[in-house]
Image (spheres, rainbow, N blue to C red):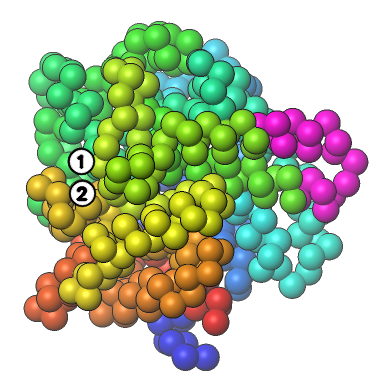
Amino acid sequence: MKNASLYNKAKEVLQNNWRAGFSIPCAKLYPFQWFWDSGLIAIGFAHFDMQKAEQEIKTLLDAQWGNGFIPHIIFHTESDTYFPGPDFHRSDLHPQSSKKYRSTGMTQPPVTGFVLEEIYRISKDKEATLKFIEDLIDKVYFNHDYFYRHRDPENEGLVYIYHNWESGTDNSPIWDDIWDTMNPPEYTFERRDTTHVDASERPSKREYDHYLYIIDIAKEHNYSDEKIAELSPFLIQDPLFNAMLIKSNESLLTLYELIGNNEAKISQLKQWQEKAINAFNKKLYDEDLGAYVHYDLRNKRPLRFLSSSSFAPLFANIPGKERADNMIKVMMNKFGKESQYLCASFDPDSERFNPKKYWRGPVWINLNWMLFDGLNRYGYTDIAERVKSDSIEIIDKNGFYEYFDSRKEVHKAGNAGYGGNNFSWSAALLIDLLEKN
Ligand code: DGY
């Protein structure tokens, strides 16, 4: 196979990040199990070690709370290389939190549904894999039920996130507008991330004050969803998060049909899906920008910025063909110039763009992987191929970094990979992209 040595290096990254029954995203910087990382990592493992792929998901779902919630970090071990750890998050405050695992009290993009379908697609023993899926699919369904019951206070079909760490796009410039509405205290704490990674590539101390303050508000109310909906200064309907939920709904529908005998769940999923897609297209599409944007539910306003999240709905088949055509034009004009790798995480023409800082501009492999699929879905195979070859090239040149500079000229000058190295989902999704020949 072309790129065989890169493929083997990717396997090695995953093998080295494997712990007892789950994977860490990367050593030191992220030493526990993360929700959406875990899902995407399982897709990589499915290509060469199905047992680990299955175990990854089993462990994740084993940490589900009594109300269906799945936490964003599961603290399987003690580690002093990460802040804020379990003693800060105090998941035990919630009456239905897991008694077995300590975790955070926030979640992350719900990838599990579509990950199960991906694992099924990759599997060479469909019967055995369907049996594995049958044993745990109801937990994923229960997680979606949690979202629609507790995260949609206006019963719109769109769910909110209450923390930037729930979005996955932790320090996106979009959140700057929320920080402007808050004035948190100055916390005293010892950052660990900036001892592993250059501070210029990570969020600022003041941003962390905001992050901690929102958690404190949630903790004051024992992570009650109702109180969070009432009081959290951060309450966002995020197009990436909601697209992941919609994509996962679709996968659950497909998988339940394959399993059979699940009429009530299938009919509920169809209802969620119809409502969600309608609301998404009505509320989150910005005609002037020509793409989807975030909605600030707390302050009742759209946050009108283009980011890689604006195009994630392509992956979930949300826009009609005409709208998708228009979005892809917008994307190529802004993010697709010849001097740029696809796809920067934030609008390269914006003054808030920073090509080195985490989610404020760099290219991320997970968003590229979704974009690749979405572009193919709408018939844009050439652009999809560019997303794939850009992803392979930046990893090949720099290593399995967490994120990469979008400016091609910077890659010519030396290392342009940032954040953690030997990062699991960069390896896992590279394997999947290479397999998609
Ligand atoms: C971090 O610590 O930066 C993580 O992304 C939180 O999920």
Question: Is label 2 within 8 A of ligand 1 (CB to nearest ligand atom)?
Answer: no
Q: Position of residue 170 (x, y in %)?
A: 29, 41
Q: Which residues are magenta?
A: 255-272
Q: Which three-letter amino acid code belongs to the residue tagged 1?
A: Pro
Asked if residue 231 is positioned above or below residue 305 in the image, the reply reads above
Q: Position of residue 399 (x, y in %)?
A: 29, 73
Q: Quadrant of residue 13?
A: bottom left
Q: Which three-letter amino acid code belongs to the residue tagged 2?
A: Arg
Residue 360 tag number: 2
Helix, strand or loop for disc 2 = loop
Q: Residues within 10 Å of mark 1 (few under 14, many from 20)?
A: many
The question of residue 266 being in magenta is answered with yes
Q: Quadrant of the C terminus?
A: bottom right
Residue corresponding to mark 1: 173
Farthest bottom residue in view: 1
Residue visible at 29% across and 74% down?
Answer: 394
Q: Quadrant of residue 409?
A: bottom left
**Left or right: 51, with 178 as reference point:** right
Residues at marks 2 and 1 touching, judged by CB atoms closer than 8 Å: yes
Residue 355 tag number: none
Q: Position of residue 62 (x, y in %)?
A: 62, 38
Residue 197 or residue 163, whichever sits in front: 163
The question of residue 24 being in magenta is answered with no
Farthest right residue in view: 261
Q: Residues within 10 Å of mark 2 (few under 14, many from 20)?
A: many
Residue visible at 64% across and 42% down?
Answer: 249
Badge count = 2
Q: Quadrant of residue 304?
A: top left
**Left or right: 384, with 131 as reference point:** left
Q: Position of residue 220 (x, y in %)?
A: 35, 9
**Left or right: 149, with 241 as reference point:** right
